[in-house]
Amino acid sequence: MKNLVIVGSGMSAMKVVDEVLKIDPLMYQITIIGEEKVLPYNRIMLSSVLAGEKDFEDIKTHDESYFSQNNITFKPGCLVSFIDRFNKSILLTNGKISYSVVYDRLVICTGSRPFILPLPGKTLEGVVSFRDIYDVEYMQSKSGQAKKVAIIGTGLLGLEAANGLNELEFDVTVIGNMDSIMNMQLDTSSGVLLQKVLEQKNIKFKLGTITNKIIGTNTVKALEFEDGTTMDVDMVVMSVGIIPEDSLAKAAGLQTDRGIIVGDTMMTSDPAIYSVGECIKHRGMSYGLVAPLFEQARVCAEQICEVSHHMYTGSDISTKLKISGVDVFSAGEFDNLEDEVMCSKDHALNTRKRLSIRDNKLVGAVLFGDSTDGLFYFDLIKKETDIASIRKTLLFGDINIDDSSTGAKGVEKMSEDEQVCGCIGVTKGDIVSAVAGGCDTFKALQEETGCATGCGGCTSVAKQVFSFVASAEILSKDVLCDCTKYSTEEVRQYIRVLDKVVSVNDVRNALDFDDICEACGAAINYYLSSQFNEAYIHNDDERPHNEKMHANKQRDGTYSIVPQMQGGLTTPKELKALADIAVKYEVPTIKVTGGQRIDLLGIPKENLNDIWDKMTEAGMKAGYAYGKATRTCKSCVGTDHCMMGTQNSMGLSIKMEDAVWSHFMPHKFKMGVSGCPRNCAEVTIKDFGVICTEKGYEIHVAGACGIRTKACLKDRFFETEEEVIEYLKAFVQLYRIEANYLERVIHFEERVGLDYIQSKLKTPSMIKHYADLLPKTIKNPWETIDHRRSA
């Protein structure tokens, strides 16, 4: 049996070992030399250990049983002091003892070392890097002693250190010489958004600042900056970059250049020695992300096992991670000022997309707050796809992801060696193998592979891959929330068979909920309401804040009020009343909304009751803009005024609002009526849209216009307004009782299918059945006294 020696016990080193064992577990006697005195661990997860979210045991990648079962010799706490290439041996030092180990193949995985700024005072006690478990233990040992910490460096590691130390209740300030954070992965605007999220956690920032000196005698006392100012600190964390650790290879005479030079087979300038990881330079590039390192490890393993299937030609790099609970995705280039830029931002969800385009090709993508479309964009970047045909919809992601006419889903297009989870290094192929091995739930997949157990940034993509691989018959069971073991459908089924009204807590107690949370409270509250209608009184304590307040809370703590204006119509009397209210209560902002309504913004909480009274006196009602409820019905002017109009669209929109008004829904429900096929009211991106024609009314359902835009599906055709109203009531009732809480119509349709909806509402008698089940209630909550208790 030949001897394979691995210098290093980090993630890339252990991936080489894993791959060798897959190919031929009997080909080599394997010896692993680890400089650290601990078992191999996932370095990416150090921030979770620092923050106290995980223990060191949780991030170990290989335990003692792994080495014993595979007959591997593991030597922790050892230093390789010399490589004798002529005799194919290495000299090991373990304390005062030195001895040689021979090899047939040697793999150098020495990784990198942190770059320490050459500042006066850099050797003082209290100056530390953030690179290994010993750094973490040192920082944790200072909890309760050192209070003021300066993080020099605004990259990923620096921010993770800042977040972890903040969780340990240190007073943290991040210092950087650039004007924005994570400038290697994020454009300036996305960096500003992330900075605001971290500032809300009391992490401070001092940007555009150059540090000149670390002040102290034996221990750190302060920092001095280029402008002459100082800042008192008890600890300094250096996180400004890494340097490939190539000193061992250089001393052995291997070719190096700020990294060990390797070819496409991962071979060094010595054919018996290979190298993988952060210590190498390949085609002029060094990589610090897990995905490229694992690609290199696979190629290396194949080469030393003499079964070459792949060559390493470099990596297209994307970064998918979760920082302080925020999903972030970055790929390609985003700093070329000559590129065209597409950008979108959702202030309510705090999400942002920025796409860079050059010569009709996507060359860069930065996603903040929602990384769901990352795979789609990354695939376009890698393949240099001409985006001319999808340019209009590019910002909305892969809008054809479920359209069988355009081919397979994005996850089907992924190669099996494409990485899904960067923290653990799980590929699509690993998920395929795990499912084939019996993982029939997503939780089982997580336990088997570790996928989506790290930062959590890959969870949405991992679920997509798992769902595709496992097929719909054995999808993971999604529980209603973390308080219960029951799924949404199981909780609903329990409620459906109840013969009397119960409370939210009665349901929790009957189903042995472990805890209570906002998610299950709001959902159960809605399900009870949809089951018992007027017999059930909403529990305000279990409702979202805006529904409790009957107004939308704004960023600054004030509120927004939107009165109902059916069909977008108003009167001079209503306009005068709104103007009088705005003047009397000094409403700072009045806006015409996209739903053809008037929004009064910036109203203090203490003025809500008086304004509601004034609006009620003027004959106006709540517009339900705050609720998971029926919203507006947008309308064009129709035959009343437009030469192109074919039907009375304004009149129909008012009838539609009256038919379904004031009903709480699984989510907001938007409608529209266009008086002719020119679609001026944009009804084909509504939950329920009507297009008027000379002969009648086309019904379109399940559209959306938000982060994701989707045109409605054409449902059916009616000849009369009465048929439209009856069908609308039936459609709404079916949605109310069968959709899950917080499930928009678009997602309800995608889950059950339009064929299913049409089968439930197939005949006039079936439509009438559901329409008759819809409660006949028209409420104006501004007239009740409930809101006064809330306000």
Image (cartoon, helix red, strand yellow):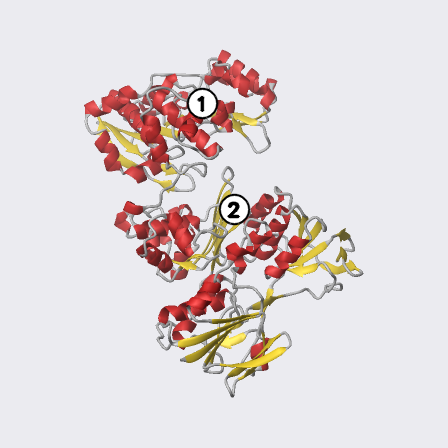
Q: CA distance from mark 2 to mark 1?
A: 32 Å
Q: Quadrant of the N terminus?
A: bottom left
Between disc 2 and disc 1, the foreground one is: 2
Residue 269 vertical placement versus 368 (above, below): below
Q: Residues within 10 Å of mark 2 (few under 14, many from 20)?
A: some
Q: Secondary structure at mark 2?
A: strand
Relative image position of residue 208 (x, y in whole percent) = 67, 54
Report the front residue among 29 and 732: 29
Closer to the camera in the image, 97 or 571? 97
Q: Position of residue 132 (x, y in %)?
A: 59, 61
Q: Amino acid at mark 1?
A: Gly
Question: Residue at image x 28%, y 25%?
Answer: 730
For the point 36% across and 75% down, the residue is 308
* Residue 206 seen: no
Q: Secondary structure at mark 1?
A: loop
Residue at x-position 48% and y-position 60%: 61
Image quarter (top left, top right, bottom left or bottom right) of the C terminus: top right
Q: Earlier in the sequence, mark 2 or mark 1?
A: 2
Task: Name the residue rendered at 26%, 37% in the picture.
Answer: 754
Q: Which residue is mark 1?
A: 623
Taking the view exactly as shown, the residue that stands out farthest to the right is 217
Q: From what the image shows, is residue 342 above or below residue 63?
A: above
Which amino acid is tagged 2?
Val
- Please tell me how many numbered marks the rendered image carries: 2
Q: Position of residue 79 (x, y in %)?
A: 59, 74
Can you say whether 151 is above or below 27 in the image? above
Q: Dot 1: within a 10 Å radius of its alpha carbon, few (fewer than 14), some, or many (20 or more) residues?
A: many
The image quadrant that residue 213 belongs to is bottom right
* Residue contact at pointers 2 and 1, CB within 8 angstroms: no
Q: Nearer the viewer, residue 389 or 117?
A: 117
On residue 326, the disc is 2
